[in-house]
Amino acid sequence: MLTAITRAVSPAIVRCELSFIDRQPIDLGRAREQHQAYEALLAKLGARVLSLPPEPDLPDSMFVEDPAIVLDEIAIILPLGTESRRPEATSLTQELSKYRKLAHVQLPGTLEGGDVLRIGRKVFVGLTKRSNAEGIRQLEEILRPHGYEVIPVSVKGCLHLKSAVTWIADNTLLANRAWFDTKPFAAYDWIDVDPAEPHAANALALGGTIIFPASFPKTRGRIGSLGLRVTTLDISELQKAESGLTCSSLLFES
Ligand code: GLY
């Protein structure tokens, strides 16, 4: 069945890493409520949600997508590009070992799951401040025997590849094309974010529904006009921690 690993919001989230947005005060109670609503929506859409306890000393630890990649065949544990976030992998590794054989990318390679966009057997990986060429090289070595093609993508102007582009349906990607090299994606169709909403490219497609941030109504209209089913979620407090929707869960079949 579809399983979603999540983690409760850390009380330390107010000290989270920020790269491309300015710091604003975060209301911890509201952040927790919004994350619980996210977990409830995943469950409503059919996922078994395994919510891990909070990590009081790890501000960004609710972003469980970043320290690991989970595929049908294997899970890969990643050295995050931000040193302060590297301890997040420890408890996730224990949890994932119940479901998958594990492989590890090793330093000096760095890689974050937010930079990894898998579409079928293609694994697009953003080359960013968080994910380097050596990390991508090691991932390629790990995944080649399993029949995956790893494709590096240059990214500029945002945190992760999936801040700039996500898969939403069939052959269609939602994107802010100003932020990455689109050449590796020549075979796909695009929905462009509304120019007034540059951060709106991170959507989470799950079971035929697209979960989308309530704060980007213009782009939501563009997605909805294609006849796709969209459910909006208020993640405004979490967005102050540079959160999208994909980064708060690890989704896999178990
Ligand atoms: N606050 C999310 C990150 O910078 O990793």
Image (cartoon, grey):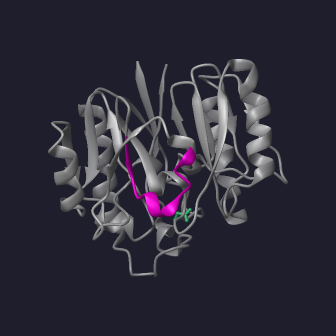
- Would you place residue 204 above or below residue 207 in this image? below
Magenta segment range?
Answer: 173-183
Whether residue 224 sits left or right of residue 196 in the image: it is left
Q: Is residue 204 left or right of residue 101?
A: left
Determine if residue 13 is in view. yes
Q: In which quarter of the image is ligand 1?
A: bottom right
The residue drawn where x is 22% and y is 46% is 223
Which is more toward the observer, 140 or 130?
140
Residue at image coords 54%, 50%: 114
Q: Residue 203 in the image: x percent, y percent?
A: 35, 47
Q: Where is residue 233 in the image (x, y as percent from the top left)?
A: 23, 52
Q: In this view, does 4 lie above or below 120?
A: below
The answer to whether residue 248 of the structure is visible from this angle is no
Quadrant where the image shows the N terminus = top left
- Residue 190 versus residue 74: which sits nearer the camera? 190
State yes or no: residue 221 in magenta. no
Residue drawn at the location 43% of the way across and 60% of the way down? 243
Using the rendered view, name the quadrant where residue 242 is placed: bottom left
Residue at 51%, 69% in the rendered image: 12
